Image: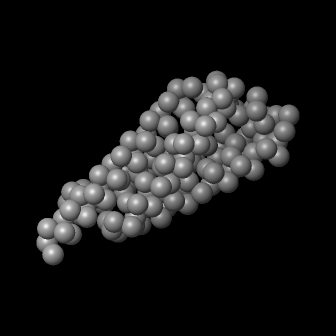
Amino acid sequence: MTTNARTILLRTNAAFLLLASSWGLWADLSGAFLGIGPQRPILAAAPHAAIGFVEAHGLAFIFGVLLWRAEAARAWHVTAAAVHALLGTSNIVFWQIFIAADMLAGGYLTTGLHWSFVTLHLLAVGMTATHVWKSA
């Protein structure tokens, strides 16, 4: 995989994280403080429970910023794969939240994209390692 292709992968990944986490933060905060939005059924009775949602979506936003600025180095692809493995696994383990919030389509989309990015970044890591060994 070329350096340019790896840069495009990191930037595409960053754009997804920035967009999805921004929407997630809006849903978390509006559900907790205003009692509106898709998280309302979950957070209206226990707004303090939003702390985990806000932390997760906030950290995803921060990783989006970092990945946007990242060079196409192997370590950044490992980092991105790990971030998406955590987020994708969390979505699967806590799938019930997508049902309770009537957000199944969003759950399918984001979880599918998380695992797609895991796969793509691991391919980038593998291809980078192969390229390094061939040139040595």
Residue 60, image x, y percentages = 56, 54
Q: Nearer the viewer, residue 95 or 48?
A: 95
Give 31 or 63, whichever is nearer the viewer: 63
Q: Position of residue 107 (x, y in %)?
A: 54, 32
Color style of the picture: one colour
Name the quadrant of the N terminus: bottom left
Give the residue displayed 45% in from the left and 47% down from the top. 16
* Residue at x 49%, y 37% (from the top left corner): 111
**For residue 110, side relative to residue 56 (left or right):** left
Question: Front-most of 107 and 14?
Answer: 107
What is the residue that sits farthest to the right in this orientation? 45
Can residue 92 be seen here? The reply is yes
Q: Quadrant of residue 3 in the image? A: bottom left
Quadrant the C terminus occupies: bottom left
Horizontal relation, residue 50 to residue 59: left or right: right
Identify the residue shown where x is 85% and y is 34%: 45
Q: Residue most toward the left?
A: 135
Q: Position of residue 11 (x, y in %)?
A: 37, 56
**Number of numbered discs on residues:** 0
Measured from the top left, where is residue 20 in percent x and y?
Answer: 53, 44
Q: Residue at x 61, y 50 (%)?
A: 57
Task: Report the side of 47 relative to 126 (left or right).
Answer: right
Q: Is residue 4 visible?
A: no
Q: Is residue 26 above or below residue 102?
A: below
| Residue positioned most to the bottom | 136
